[in-house]
């Protein structure tokens, strides 16, 4: 082994002398150093994987109970409208996919942010005078979940925090904490149809707050914010200079007595990343086509956030190209009656479920206004044999074969969530079983015997 010393020019980043060992005889010094080390396998999961936690999976997977073998299982727990086959997508949507596949044009890679023509279609579909959009304002993603992930990744660094709703979609926490981002929970108020406690929300903001997540219409609440309430939310964001991630995957899925207001149409001052997709409104969650709409009329995001989203999108090279190829026909040719019929069914089921559960002593459902869910409060003092909502829903499953998600999954104990996409006959049967279960386990709270006697 020969040794050479090489003099270099002065540099702030390099030492002035490089001590170089050259292997001439065929034996490396590294091999010599490795002789004293006993090689062994030491493969460990990354910090990111260890920090990834899905509370729904943790709770559901740890359920040890089995359903009543004498009763058919009715699942009111899965937010997938396709499960029971009663809510198919429109034939125009299916035909658009067939045509895109048969064309042979969409078998290769697309740009990571999506085909320009597909982004133009999304921009045109959502463009309005109050919130103008161009293709450059659209990033196509692999479902709305990836849209949310990209938005969190571009807005927040490890050690910063984001504000998320309680109760709220569990994926926000799952994604944030896997990236080392802290979550702070702002409260939704059931007595006000799940409006945000704005004073408590604003108290959470500090100099490390990277963004505010607003989900409207809501999963798990089925609530729809009024224009006035949305304006108050925007006022907080503008006052505190906090950008908004708007999860609007259930946008336009509002029952006939309400109105959906896209958040970006109500402010020119607050920068907003709006996340949406085909999954819910078009009833194709498995097709995995979502989008980010960039609303930044004051140029607060500037090129940096836009460029950051492009870079992040390059990690998986974009969503399915065949669905992108079908997007123009899906957006332009889906008939209005399809949307109307879907919402009519959901509203009817929501009213049926709400009415049935509201009549059961010990339960306090909150009337929904949109999306696919409603939340039901459990007056735990009347069910003393159950410690919490998890035990309540476990026993409901074991005795009545009705599966509901305990709202602990959504950071909101002593409630449970009902999915209202099941066929009407199943919804009626499920509500009947829930009533039977509650009647069997209901106890008068201490000091309220007179009320029970009524």
Image (tube, grey):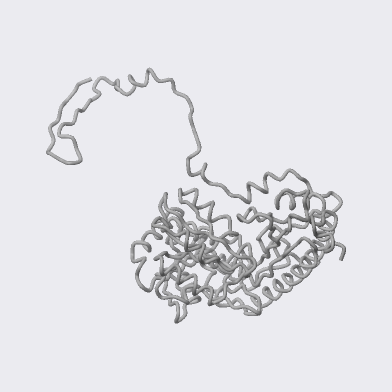
The foreground one among 236 and 21 is 236
Would residue 352 be found to the left or right of residue 211 on screen? right
* Quadrant in which the N terminus is drawn: top left
The foreground one among 21 and 149 is 149
Q: Is 177 rendered above or below residue 105? A: above
Residue 312 x, y percent position in the rendering: 42, 56
In which quadrant of the rendered view does residue 434 lie? bottom right
* Quadrant in which the C terminus is drawn: bottom right
In which quadrant of the rendered view does residue 29 lie? top left
Residue furthest to the front in view is 447
The foreground one among 239 and 170 is 239
Residue 346 x, y percent position in the rendering: 70, 71
Residue 94, visible in the rendered structure? no
Residue 236 x, y percent position in the rendering: 45, 68
Residue 183 x, y percent position in the rendering: 50, 53
Residue drawn 68% across and 73% down? 342
Would residue 278 be found to the left or right of residue 358 on screen? left
Number of callouts: 0
Q: Is 273 rendered above or below residue 443? A: below
Residue 398, visible in the rendered structure? yes
The foreground one among 350 and 201 is 201
Q: Is 168 rendered above or below residue 47? A: below
């Amino acid at each position: 082994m020969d040794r050479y010393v090489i003099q270099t020019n002065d540099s702030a980043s390099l030492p002035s002398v490089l001590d170089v060992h050259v292997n001439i005889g065929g034996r490396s010094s590294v091999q010599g150093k490795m002789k004293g080390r006993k090689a062994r396998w030491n493969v460990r999961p990354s910090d990111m994987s260890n920090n990834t936690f899905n509370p729904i999976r943790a709770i559901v997977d740890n359920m040890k109970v089995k359903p009543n073998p004498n009763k058919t299982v009715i699942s009111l727990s899965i937010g997938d409208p396709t499960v029971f086959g009663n809510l198919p997508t429109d034939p125009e949507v299916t035909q658009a996919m067939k045509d895109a596949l048969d064309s042979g044009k969409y078998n290769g890679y697309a740009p990571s942010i999506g085909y320009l023509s597909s982004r133009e279609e999304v921009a045109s579909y959502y463009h309005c005078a109050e919130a103008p959009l161009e293709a450059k304002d659209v990033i196509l993603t692999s479902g709305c979940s990836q849209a949310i992930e990209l938005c969190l990744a571009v807005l927040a660094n490890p050690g910063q925090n984001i504000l998320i709703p309680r109760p709220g979609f569990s994926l926000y926490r799952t994604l944030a904490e896997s990236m080392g981002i802290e979550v702070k929970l702002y409260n939704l108020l059931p007595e006000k149809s799940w409006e945000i406690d704005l004073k408590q929300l604003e108290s959470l903001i500090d100099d490390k707050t990277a963004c505010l997540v607003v989900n409207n219409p809501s999963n798990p609440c089925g609530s729809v914010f009024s224009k006035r309430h949305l304006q108050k939310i925007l006022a907080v964001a503008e006052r505190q200079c906090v950008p908004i991630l708007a999860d609007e995957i259930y946008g336009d899925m509002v029952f006939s007595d309400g109105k959906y207001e896209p958040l970006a149409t109500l402010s020119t001052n607050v920068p907003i990343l709006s996340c949406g997709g085909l999954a819910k409104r078009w009833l194709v969650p498995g097709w995995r086509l979502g989008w980010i709409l960039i609303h930044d009329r004051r140029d607060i995001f500037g090129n940096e956030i836009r460029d950051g989203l492009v870079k992040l999108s390059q990690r998986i090279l974009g969503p399915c190209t065949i669905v992108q190829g079908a997007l123009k026909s899906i957006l332009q040719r889906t008939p209005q009656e399809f949307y109307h019929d879907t919402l009519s069914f959901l509203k009817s089921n929501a009213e049926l479920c709400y009415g049935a559960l509201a009549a059961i002593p010990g339960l306090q459902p909150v009337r929904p206004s949109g999306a696919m869910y409603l939340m039901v409060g459990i007056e735990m003092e009347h069910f003393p044999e159950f410690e919490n909502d998890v035990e309540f829903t476990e026993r409901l499953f074991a005795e009545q074969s009705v599966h509901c998600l305990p709202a602990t999954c959504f950071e909101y104990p002593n409630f449970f969530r009902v999915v209202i996409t099941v066929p009407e006959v199943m919804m009626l049967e499920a509500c009947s079983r829930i009533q039977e279960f509650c009647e069997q386990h209901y106890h008068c709270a201490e000091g309220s015997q007179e009320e029970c006697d009524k």
